[in-house]
Image (cartoon, rainbow, N blue to C red):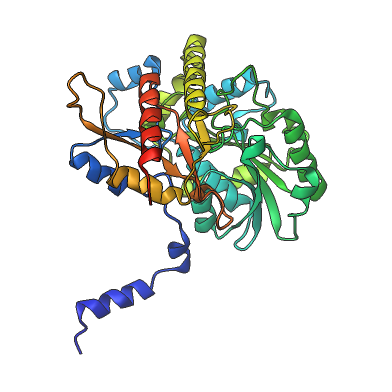
Amino acid sequence: MKKSPESTTLVFLSMTSQRLSSVPASPIRKLVPYATAAKKAGVKVYHFNIGDPDIKTPEVMLQVLRDWDRNPVGYSQSQGEPSLLESLKIYYHGLGAIFLDTSHLQVTIGGSEAISWALFAVADPGDEIIVFEPFYANYNTYAAVNGVQLVPIPTNLSDGFHLPAQSVIEGKITKKTKAILYCNPNNPTGTVYSKSEIETLVALAKKHGLFLLSDEVYREFTYDGARQVSLLSFMQEIPEHAIVLDSLSKRYSVCGARIGALISLNQDIMAGVLRIGQGRLSAGLIDQLMAAKLTKVPVSYFQEVHDEYEKRRDVLYEGLRHIPGVTIPKPEGAFYAIVGLPVEDAEHFCQWLLTDFRDPSPSADGSGQAETVMVAPAAGFYATPGKGKNEVRIAYVLSIPDIIRCIDILTKALNAYHP
């Protein structure tokens, strides 16, 4: 008997894996269709939802594109382009990790691939990895793809999302626990962990034989005189257990170049991830040769970028904390903030901003373009059901005038919102 199109579809759907259906939608991008519809209707949407910086890419990197004359564009080496590996080694030596050699470095396609490979390398399906919530939402994706169970430990807005006591963390360690994964400076909270907090994690890794995975994408972005304490400083203390995960995307505003790195002194880890790298052939040649110019980026570039983000942080913090019902701890680093709103369902509010709320842009005759703002519901940055339901994550990657305008829009929207 010939099957109907409907029955064929049902058979096809039943054949997909459970892992595929377990991969969650990104809370950062899930509302994109609503933003797209608003734009098609002529509405200007300010993107406060995603960490895609407007800061310019260093000219020395762009010059690689302007001067490109290789034809054809071939593969690179699976570990990474030699010139990029050498530049990365010089960069990490500048951070004090003079013990690192290129054999301790694996170039990845963005920091995302580094995180996913690390989970694959340290845990088998069904094993557990401790995280601190709220956490970078895409950890959920990498965990689902690799069959790993994330075990969340709550942190609180009231104390700036700093780590709980060692006993609390230790209480979550079981026979299935294989690693602790943390992000410092933190996405999505903007928290910068202290030296004593990192020492606590190192002590737990040593005591229980756990891997310690440190996501350090925002290393350079710390404010008010604070300095990031890198796991690189402890790598020789726990050489078999420390893995640093890194990316050039935010540091050099090259999100589209997709270059990251995995760093470890564990020879088995490095040999294993290289085998994975060989299976996917290589990261992009053009991207890597751009990134290899990182040693040529002037120090003044970083200082200007750092100062700009700190100013933006100050404007955002001062503006939001004066809105009735809004709670925001002062971000200590990165360019994100978790913000509590006086609403019961932040996801509904975020969607409503895109589908219903419109504010005319300021103009002398009152005929300005309709505008709204897009922010990310924070529930997707938690693993515990019900957590973050009245919170949003904001990425302050817009110019200061645009941030001021977004604060104005959010103020008006909260006053008008009646679900």
Q: Is residue 351 left or right of residue 296?
A: left
Q: Is residue 315 above or below residue 212?
A: above
Depth check: 132 or 138 in front?
A: 132
* Left or right placement of residue 68 versus residue 418 in this view: left
**Quarter of the image where one finds residue 99:** top right
Q: Position of residue 306 (x, y in %)?
A: 51, 18
Relative placement, left or right, of 322 versus 193 is left
Is any atom of residue 31 visible in this view?
A: no
Whole-percent x, y for residue 192 in the image = 63, 30
Q: Position of residue 233 (x, y in %)?
A: 71, 28
Q: Residue at x 67, y 24 (%)?
A: 97
Dividing the image into 4 quarters, which one contains the N terminus? bottom left
Residue at position x 63%, y 48% in the image: 131
* Residue in the picture at 35% in, 32% down: 409
Name the residue at the bottom extreme.
Answer: 1
**Rendered position, 163 above or below 253:** below
Count numbered badges in the picture. Answer: 0
Q: Residue at x 49, y 43 (%)?
A: 342
Residue 222, relative to residue 266: is it above or below?
above
Give residue 329's quadrant in the image: top right
- Residue 196 visible: yes
| Observer-nearest of 202 and 47 | 47
Residue 202: x and y in percent read 76, 39
